[in-house]
Amino acid sequence: MVDISVVVPVYNVEELLPRCIDSILNQTKKNIEIILVDDGATDGSGAVCDAYAKKDERIRVIHKPNGGLTSAWKAGAEVSTGTYLGFIDSDDWIDADMYERMWESAVQYDSDVVVCGLVFDYEDPSLEKRQEISGFEKEFYNRQELEKLFPTLLNDGRFFGRMLQPARVTKLYRRELVEKNMPLCKEEVTVGEDLQLTLPALLDAKSMSVVKDFYPYHYWFNQNSMTGKFDPQYLDKIKVMAKRMKEISKEKGSYDFSSQITNDFLGLAVIGLKNGVIRNKEGKKSAMDIIKRYCNDEMVVEALKKHTMNQLPITIRGFLLLMKAKQYQICYMICKLFFKS
């Protein structure tokens, strides 16, 4: 029986892929299988996957037509055999003891979900690495203790006050949780898609353990990727995500997360508007059009009215009031002067 299945969605990362695969092969935890899902790559990524599969019998390769990140990890999960499932994105890498320590936590506590942290590694070496972990204070939570976290799980009243770090790559999930919740994960969600798995899995979990002060996952932040650019479709994408998360919350029925999801959506909208100004290469008129679009969008207007964030810094609180009052010019000036990154 395989202890851990590691699913790696692969798309056009030929140069970075060996670093990712090698980091998994070098794990001190040996009883694992590695499922590389070639999601219709148009470069040499598929060939790299096949070459590695010939070197190590723990590696399996799936070649499929391009369907996006969610469809790729779902395809890998469907054929996996491990007791637990982990996920790694193909341009990232992990420390050698990541899965051994997470497995030890899973066994010690009989956990349904195990959580660790990650570190952002930037392509620009002048930028300082940044660590991030979920805001869980204890090493173990039983079901009753998990339910006590629900009122602040997605937003605790702060701007982006997420207790739950959504990333699937910093989790081990018991297989049954993934199988049960895969149907909830829709391919049309392309921003924040990890939350489609992480939230319902945690709602179904009977227990969760946290490997404290442990940041073995290296998230490669490429400034030239879409992560570092302004996405003109970003507002549409986060609207799809917020609507889907409210549907999941309603379907699960164990707790109403709708207000927290509204808060989270509004935070994402502010970031989208900000990026539409400071990362827009088309000039002030284009930036002003983006501000107007965000401030007049029906979902954003509703979120500005109904959000429940009560621990906002004065700058964000003031900015939300300006958005609500449709003070486009002042919003533009604030983005330029104060929101520079």
Image: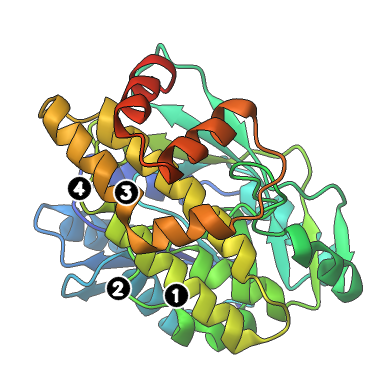
CA–CA distance between discs 1 and 3?
Answer: 20 Å
Give the numbered dot on residue 139: none
Q: What residue type is labelled 2?
A: Glu
Please name whichever residue, 192 or 10, is drawn nearer the observer in this view of the structure.
Answer: 192
**Disc nearer the start of the sequence (3/2):** 2
CA–CA distance between discs 3 and 4?
Answer: 11 Å
CA–CA distance between discs 2 and 4?
Answer: 17 Å
CA–CA distance between discs 1 and 4?
Answer: 20 Å
Location of mark 1 (residue) = 244
Location of mark 3 (residue) = 294
Q: Which of marks 2 and 1 is in front?
A: 1
**Disc nearer the start of the sequence (2/1):** 2
Q: What residue type is labelled 1?
A: Arg
Disc 3 packing (10 Å; few <14; some 14–19; many ≥20): many
Q: Which amino acid does label 4 sit on?
A: Pro
Give the numbered dot on residue 188: 2
Quarter containing the C terminus: top left
Location of mark 4 (residue) = 232
Disc 4 packing (10 Å; few <14; some 14–19; many ≥20): few
Q: Which amino acid does label 3 sit on?
A: Tyr
Q: Please state the horizontal and vertical placement of residue 194, each as a whole percent of the image.
A: 48, 63
Please name whichever residue, 147 or 42, is drawn nearer the observer in this view of the structure.
Answer: 147
Quarter containing the N terminus: bottom right
**Disc nearer the start of the sequence (1/3):** 1
Where disc 2 sits, the SS reads loop
CA–CA distance between discs 3 and 2?
Answer: 21 Å
Q: Please state the horizontal and vertical placement of residue 187, each as a whole percent of the image.
A: 32, 74
